[in-house]
Amino acid sequence: MENAQWNKPVYETNGLNLWYGTSHALKNINLTIHEKEVTAIIGPSGCGKSTYLKTLNRMVELAGNVSISGNVTFQGDNILDRSMPVEMLRSKVGMVFQKPNPFPKSIYENVAFGPKIHGIKNRAILEQVVENSLKKAALWDEVKDRLHENAYGLSGGQQQRLCIARALAVEPEVILMDEPTSALDPVSTNKVEELIKEIKNDVTIVIVTHNMQQAARISDRTAFFLNGEVIEYDRTSTIFNEPADQLTHDYINGRFG
Ligand SMILES: Nc1ncnc2c1ncn2[C@@H]1O[C@H](COP(=O)(O)OP(=O)(O)OP(=O)(O)O)[C@@H](O)[C@H]1O
């Protein structure tokens, strides 16, 4: 069942424009991300999905030569304001990438890393955080007897769930996911989808996906991007069953993209 219609806004994007050099990648984006919902971002390759996602934690600036106008507020603060400390933002907003990227450390150390950075030193507390995070990421049973083995020994699907556990360990408000299952087999994909449905009780999720069935299965709202613009943004059931825009209809039905 979808969440209530008006969950509290977490992010509010107003009149966002972004250029890489002279290339206009995001055009007048207006989008509200609601708390404890899964918001899917869909659209053809190159339409600006990842750029928008990476604006939400200001990672996009790492590309260099990026200029931005407009407003993106996170919990009421404009994150594009230079005075907003990016570390504070990133401590509340985790990210999971297309390719699992565990650290070359043990499973335990991967999950304990963030809490340690945040100052937790007590071993018993750390052990509890690691266990809870791995349980939330539906990985505990598979790794509880090998916590001190290198994370690279896990399968790709397990590594991706470990990365989700690592993100959850710092109790973020939001997790941004950039095509988190595109490198995984169907069984692992299913596990990650189930876990996304589970963790949205605790955390807001924004997910970029090329897989429209996935967007339909797991998200509450869907934004359809095309050529740097949001063509339509609505409840997922509306986008997939009765979209307002012909372009959305055509994309959903595989006519292009
Ligand atoms: N670092 C960069 N420098 C210059 N242009 C970039 C950079 N990153 C992305 N772009 C361009 O910005 C546009 C949007 O790219 P983006 O990666 O956001 O699209 P996307 O919808 O996520 O695509 P895909 O589905 O293929 O990952 C594209 O035209 C892309 O070539």
Image (spheres, grey):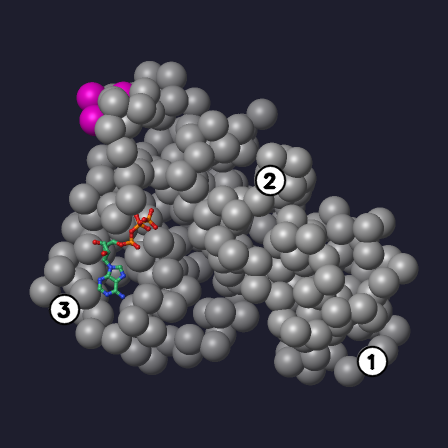
Q: CA distance from mark 3 to mark 2?
A: 37 Å
Q: Taking 121 as reference, is 30 left or right?
A: left
Q: Which residue is mark 3?
A: 21
Whether 121 is drawn above or below 247: the answer is below
Residue at 10%, 65% in the rendered image: 22
Asked whether 191 or 13 is in front, the reply is 191
Identify the image quadrant of residue 201.
Answer: top right
Is residue 116 shown to the viewer in this render? yes
Question: For residue 38: magenta?
Answer: no
Look at the numbered discs 3 and 2 and tell me whether their residues touch, using CB distance below 8 Å: no
Crowding around mark 3 (Cα neighbors within 10 Å: few <14, some 14 to 19, many 20+) is few
Q: Main secondary structure of the magenta part?
A: helix
Q: Nearer the viewer, mark 3 or mark 1?
A: 3
Q: Taking 177 as reference, is 70 left or right?
A: left
Looking at the rendered structure, the number of numbered marks drawn on it comes to 3
Q: Which residues are magenta?
A: 245-249
Q: Earlier in the sequence, mark 2 or mark 1?
A: 1
